[in-house]
Image (cartoon, grey):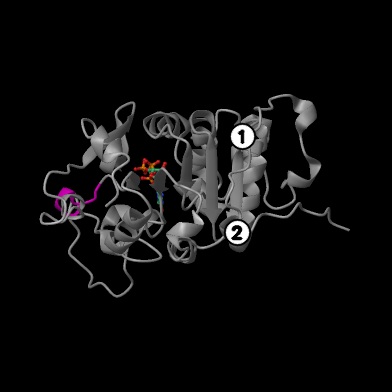
C-alpha cells in the first residue's frame, strides 16, 4: 500500500482563515523531515545522464543551477524541468520581493517558493497540479522551509476571483506581493507565438513572444486580475517578450506616472528571462507599495 500523503490545504480553507498562521521557526534539522511529505514515489530522481530522456538532458545538465541541493533528492516532473527558475535568479527575485505575505501563483516544483520562504514572513504557493504541488513541498522540505509555505491546490484564476469576492469588512488575509511565473506555452516559447491558432510565421532569428501565448489566460488579463489583489507584482517572462507589450500593461490613462522596471536575468553569458517589477517593487516607486489602486 502506498504511503498516505498529508493533506494539502484547499482554497476554501485558505479563504475562511482570517488570521495568518503564526510564522514558525525555520527548521533545518534533518530530524524535522516529515515522512508524509516525501514525494519520491511520484517521479524519478535522476542521478546519471544515461537515465534521462533525451529531450530533458539539457535541463538535467543544469540541475544544480536549478536546485543547489539537487543531490539531496530534489524532484522535478517534465514541466518542472523546463520551467523551474534557476536558484540564483529565484534568490535575487526573492530579495526584491521581501515582504510579509507573498502569493506564488504558479509555484510549479517550488524553486521560487523556496526562495521566498527565506525572505518573506509567509508564502502562499498555488498550483493546479497535485503532483507538482507535492514535489514543491518535497523540495521545500529538503531546503528546511516547508513549514513556512502554505501549499494550496487551486488554479490561480479561481483563487483570485474567490479572494476578491470576500467583502472587505470581513478582512481577507492581506497579500503584499503577487509573483507570476505562469506557463509560457512550453519550451517552444522561444520560437515566438505559441498559440495553436496563430498563423505560421516565417522563421526569423529573433522571433518575439507575445503575452497572448501565456496560459491559462492572456498575460495581460493575468496581470490586470493580479493588480486587483495588490499593486506589487513581479512578473517572470520570456527573454524574447516584446517590451512594448510589457509597457502597455500600464495603461497610460490609469497609471500616469507609474513605471515598470524590467530586469534581465543573466547567468554567465546567457540571458535566461525577464522579471518585470510593478507598483512599489519598481525602483523609486516605494510610495506605490501600500497605495490602493
Ligand atoms: P529555456 O530557454 O527553455 O532554457 O528557459 P535554456 O536552458 O536557457 O535554453 P537554451 O536552449 O536557450 O540554452 C530559460 C528559463 O526560462 C528556464 O530556466 C526557466 O526559468 C524559464 N522558463 C522556461 N519555460 C518554458 C518556462 C515556462 O513555461 N514558464 C515559466 N514561468 N518559466 C519558464
What residue do we see at 30% from left, 63% from top? 221
**In the structure shown, which secondary structural element does the residue marked by tag 1 occupy?**
loop
Residue sitting at the far front: 169
Q: Percent x, y for residue 69? A: 60, 29
The disc at residue 23 is: 1
Question: Looking at the image, how many numbered discs can be counted on the residues?
Answer: 2
Residue sitting at the far right: 1
Side of 75 relative to 31 (left or right): left
Residue sitting at the far bottom: 197
Quarter of the view holding residue 145: top right
Quarter of the view holding residue 209: bottom left
What residue do we see at 63% from left, 59% from top? 13
Looking at this view, is 209 or 97 the one in front? 97
Q: Percent x, y for residue 89? A: 40, 32
What residue do we see at 78% from left, 46% from top? 36
**In the structure shown, which secondary structural element does the residue marked by tag 2 occupy?**
helix
Q: Percent x, y for residue 257? A: 12, 44
Amino acid at each position: 500500500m502506498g504511503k498516505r500523503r498529508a493533506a494539502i490545504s484547499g482554497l476554501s480553507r485558505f479563504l475562511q482563515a482570517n488570521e495568518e498562521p503564526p510564522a514558525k521557526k525555520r527548521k533545518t534539522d534533518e530530524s524535522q523531515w516529515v515522512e508524509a511529505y516525501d514525494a519520491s514515489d511520484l517521479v524519478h530522481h535522476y542521478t546519471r545522464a544515461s537515465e534521462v530522456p533525451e529531450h530533458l538532458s539539457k535541463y538535467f545538465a543544469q540541475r544544480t543551477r536549478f536546485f543547489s541541493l539537487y543531490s539531496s533528492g530534489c524532484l522535478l516532473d517534465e514541466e518542472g524541468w523546463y520551467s523551474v527558475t534557476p536558484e540564483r535568479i529565484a534568490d535575487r527575485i526573492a530579495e526584491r520581493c521581501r515582504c510579509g505575505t507573498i502569493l506564488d501563483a504558479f509555484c510549479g516544483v517550488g524553486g521560487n517558493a523556496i526562495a521566498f520562504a527565506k525572505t518573506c514572513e509567509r508564502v502562499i504557493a498555488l498550483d493546479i497540479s497535485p503532483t507538482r504541488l507535492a514535489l514543491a513541498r518535497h523540495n521545500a522540505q529538503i531546503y528546511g522551509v516547508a513549514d513556512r509555505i502554505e501549499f494550496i491546490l487551486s488554479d490561480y484564476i479561481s483563487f483570485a476571483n474567490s479572494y476578491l469576492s470576500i467583502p472587505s469588512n470581513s478582512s481577507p488575509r492581506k497579500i503584499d506581493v503577487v509573483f507570476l511565473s505562469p506557463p509560457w506555452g512550453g519550451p517552444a516559447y522561444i520560437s515566438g507565438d505559441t498559440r495553436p491558432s496563430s498563423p505560421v510565421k516565417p522563421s526569423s532569428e529573433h522571433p518575439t513572444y507575445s503575452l497572448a501565448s501565456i496560459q491559462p489566460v492572456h498575460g495581460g488579463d493575468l496581470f490586470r486580475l493580479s493588480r486587483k489583489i495588490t499593486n506589487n507584482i513581479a512578473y517572470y517572462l520570456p527573454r524574447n517578450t516584446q517590451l512594448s507589450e510589457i509597457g502597455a500593461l500600464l495603461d497610460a490613462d490609469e497609471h500616469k506616472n507609474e513605471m515598470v522596471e524590467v530586469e534581465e536575468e543573466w547567468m554567465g553569458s546567457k540571458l535566461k528571462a525577464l522579471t518585470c517589477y510593478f507598483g512599489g517593487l519598481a525602483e523609486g516607486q516605494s510610495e506605490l507599495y501600500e497605495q490602493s489602486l
